RNA sequence: GUGGAUGUAGCUCAGCUGGUUAGAGCAUCAGAUUGUGGUUCUGAGGGUCGUGGGUUCGAGCCCCAUCUUCCACC
């Protein structure tokens, strides 16, 4: 009766191995744009571009298996007309692998000028030109149909932190109302370009266990192709995020991929995997990379620091990317200090390569059966500052 | 040589009629960044106010000398 999504989308998820000492698992998501090995990190390409990175670098060097686009941004620019005439985002940006699009709910709350939430949807003003727009659970699906993303996200309200219980409860009720309408509209619409398009609902409920449970239980019953956890890593203590994740993952169906939205640091991702999460996205490797922060298996480097001025060693000892081997710390620092655009590009390639390496290692360790011990050590390593 | 202007943080400059701990931008150094702000945010260090005298309760500011740099005129 609630078995809605798989019949329509044809997306498949197969678990290959499970860790004995944690809830970590590794598997494969199949889409019509190819397979995704989980756990996976998805580079963020908000406006149809992973900032500073060519698509061929993304595919061949970084080995990204799926990237993100954003409905809010793409709807404002270039707009649905361009995207439709281009034949969808895949063609428009020359990316053949899967794309997941966020619905824009988060952006309405973080970027838009004046916003007003009603049962109908979210009315907001563009951060670009101030023009007024309305997102509804239905039209964000229509826009994502035009984009042609392999995974579409439901419109939700991302609650801020801190957030009082009453607000969180009301907010969840609105997100749930929007979700029911979204599911209905999803059933009644079709992909435009022949590829399968899954629809992921989003668990909310702030940091309140009962609200999170209520939200996860509702969503579990929908039996969609995958399920997302939103409203975390918005300022709450990390431990609280893990607690919520544990509660939610114990309820969301095991045989469906679980997507923790917007997370996070390398340590966050490793802990998230241990708690049974399969998909992650975060701007951190690219945004922080653009500002000179490098993530490595030995810890975090601020490449702008003076101590690297005469350090002619390669960027990272455990090279996960060609940039690690051919460039030195001193040179990369010089590029940043000089404001050269090659600096942020190299740092972004390095960071994304490291993130993709990290989840690949996690997959290997889960298959080999020694994930937990490896994870414990790695969390310590990646969290220290060099 | 004469006349005029100028000198304050690494750089470019504010600094009122003489009044408390001399400021800004850039640069430097460091921090932040979690469903994207590449140009964002925060903090820190850095000064014998050209030099030497003087006036004054008190001088970056007034007076004298001297040096620097620039301009004009002989």
Image (cartoon, coloured by chain):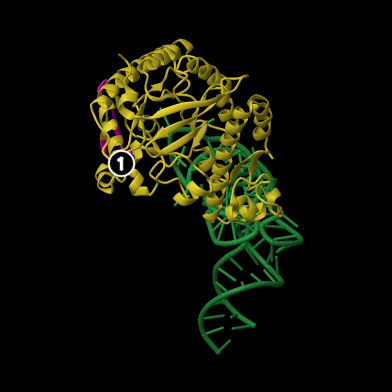
Chain colours: A yellow, B green
Q: Residue at x 35, y 29 (%)?
A: A10
Which residue has dot 1 on it? Answer: A76
Residue A327 can be seen in this image: no
Chain at tag 1: A
Residue A203 can be seen in this image: yes
Residue A111, how many percent across, how many down? 38, 35
Q: Residue at x 65, y 38 (%)?
A: A297
In the image, the segment drawn in magenta is: A118-132
Nearest to the observer: residue A91 or residue A292: A91
Question: What main secondary structure does the magenta stretch of the protein show?
Answer: loop
- Judged left or right of residue B10, residue A150 is left
Element assignment for label 1: helix
- Judged left or right of residue A298, residue A122 is left
Labels in figure, total: 1
The quadrant holding residue A299 is top right
Residue A87, how many percent across, how many down? 28, 46
Residue A275, how many percent across, how many down? 55, 21
The quadrant holding residue A196 is top left
The quadrant holding residue A361 is top right
Quarter of the image that includes the N terminus of chain A? top left
Quarter of the image that includes the C terminus of chain A? top right
Residue A354, how many percent across, how many down? 59, 41
- Was residue A131 drawn as part of the magenta stretch in this picture? yes
- Judged left or right of residue A247, residue B56 is right
């Amino acid at each position: 009766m609630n078995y809605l999504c798989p019949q329509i989308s044809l997306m498949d998820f197969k678990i290959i191995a499970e860790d004995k000492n944690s809830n970590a698992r590794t598997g494969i998501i199949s889409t019509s744009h190819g397979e995704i090995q989980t756990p996976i990190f998805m580079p963020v390409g908000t406006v149809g571009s992973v900032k500073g990175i060519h698509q061929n670098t993304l595919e061949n060097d970084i080995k990204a298996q799926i990237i993100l686009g954003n409905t809010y941004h793409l709807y404002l620019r270039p707009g649905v007309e361009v995207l439709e005439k281009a034949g969808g985002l895949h063609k428009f940006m020359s990316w053949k692998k899967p794309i997941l699009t966020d619905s824009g709910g988060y952006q309405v709350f973080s970027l838009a000028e004046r916003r007003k939430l009603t049962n109908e949807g979210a009315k907001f003003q563009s951060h670009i030109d101030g023009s007024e727009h309305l997102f509804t659970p239905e039209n964000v699906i229509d826009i994502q149909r035009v984009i042609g993303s392999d995974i579409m996200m439901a419109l939700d309200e991302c609650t801020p932190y801190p957030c009082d219980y009453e607000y969180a409860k009301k907010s969840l009720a609105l997100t749930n109302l929007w979700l029911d309408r979204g599911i209905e509209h999803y059933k009644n619409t079709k992909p435009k370009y022949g590829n399968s398009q899954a629809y992921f609902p989003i668990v909310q409920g702030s940091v309140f266990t009962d609200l999170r449970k209520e939200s996860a239980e509702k969503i579990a019953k929908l039996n969609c192709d995958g399920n997302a956890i939103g409203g975390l890593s918005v300022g709450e203590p990390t431990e609280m995020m893990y607690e919520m994740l544990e509660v939610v993952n114990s309820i969301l169906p095991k045989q469906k991929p679980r997507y923790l939205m917007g997370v996070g640091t390398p340590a966050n991702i490793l802990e998230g995997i241990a708690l049974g999460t399969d998909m992650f996205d975060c701007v951190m490797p690219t945004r922080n990379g653009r500002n000179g922060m490098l993530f490595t298996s030995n810890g975090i480097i601020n490449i702008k620091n003076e101590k690297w001025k005469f350090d002619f060693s390669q960027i990272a000892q455990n090279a996960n990317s060609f940039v690690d081997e051919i460039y030195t710390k001193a040179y990369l620092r010089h590029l940043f200090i000089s404001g050269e655009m090659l600096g942020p590009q190299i740092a972004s390639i390095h960071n994304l390569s490291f993130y993709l390496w990290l989840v690949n290692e996690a997959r290997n360790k889960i298959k080999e059966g020694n994930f937990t011990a490896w994870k414990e050590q790695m969390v310590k390593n990646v969290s220290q500052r060099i």
